[in-house]
Image (cartoon, rainbow, N blue to C red):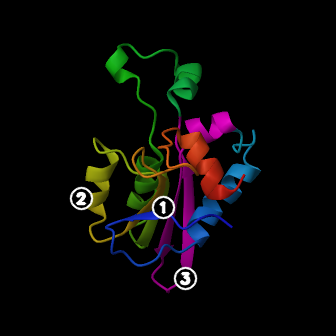
Amino acid sequence: MPRIPNSKPLDSPRCDLRLPEAALRYRRTANPVLTTPQALGAINVTAWLYRDRNGVVGIQVNPNVTIAELARVYGPAATPDAEVGLHSEGLAADWFRTRPDLTVIQIFSERVPCFSMCAPMLRHYYPGVPWYYYYDSNSWRGNNGERIRRAGEILRSAYGV
């Protein structure tokens, strides 16, 4: 059973634990398996809880697309500042953009949405929708109180893998 994630805002209702469970299930069934320490550190998975017009609830899961994967498929970026992966939150938001009959209820992302692109996008397009996350470089402490800064270590702990 995954741990209860952090929330933004702090006074949000409790995260629907089906979201981190869906993210972990995606990791366990993806090919190649995404539960290795390297994959936990490189891939961010997001799971969004939504409701359709008939009240049916569902979950949409999206991983990010890494810079390395984009370079493998399309070649290297023309300039260093163009070396950016596709963020899982942006991919999920685009999926919902094409499905206006769905209402987003909660957003879970393994990493806190980035402050430069994803957080502003979520605040603009999904105001009032709470976010939940595990990794924020300032939020995790080890058994001896030391700060854990690597996403892979934090996700291993949060998921118990």
Residue 121's x, y, as percent? 29, 52
Dot 2: element: helix
Q: Is residue 5 visible?
A: yes
The Cα atoms of the two marked residues, 1 and 2, are separated by 17 Å
| Magenta span | 37-65
- Distance from disc 3 to disc 2, alpha carbons, whole Å, reads 25 Å
> On screen, 93 above or below 66?
below
Q: Name the residue: 48% across, 39% down.
A: 149
| Residue drawn at point x = 51 percent, y = 42 percent | 148
**Residue at which label 2 appears:** 124
Helix, strand or loop under label 3: loop
* Amino acid beneath label 2: His
Mark positioned earlier in the residue sequence (3 or 2): 3
Residue type of the residue flagged with mark 1: Phe
Asked if residue 124 lies left or right of residue 102, the reply is: left
Asked whether, in this view, residue 81 is left or right of residue 134, the answer is: left
As shown in the figure, which amino acid type bears the numbered disc 3? Val
Find residue 108 and name its label.
1
Q: Residues within 10 Å of mark 3 (few under 14, many from 20)?
A: few
Q: Nearer the viewer, mark 1 or mark 2?
A: 1
Q: Is residue 45 magenta?
A: yes
Is residue 42 or residue 65 the one in the foreground? 42
- Write down the residue under mark 3: 56
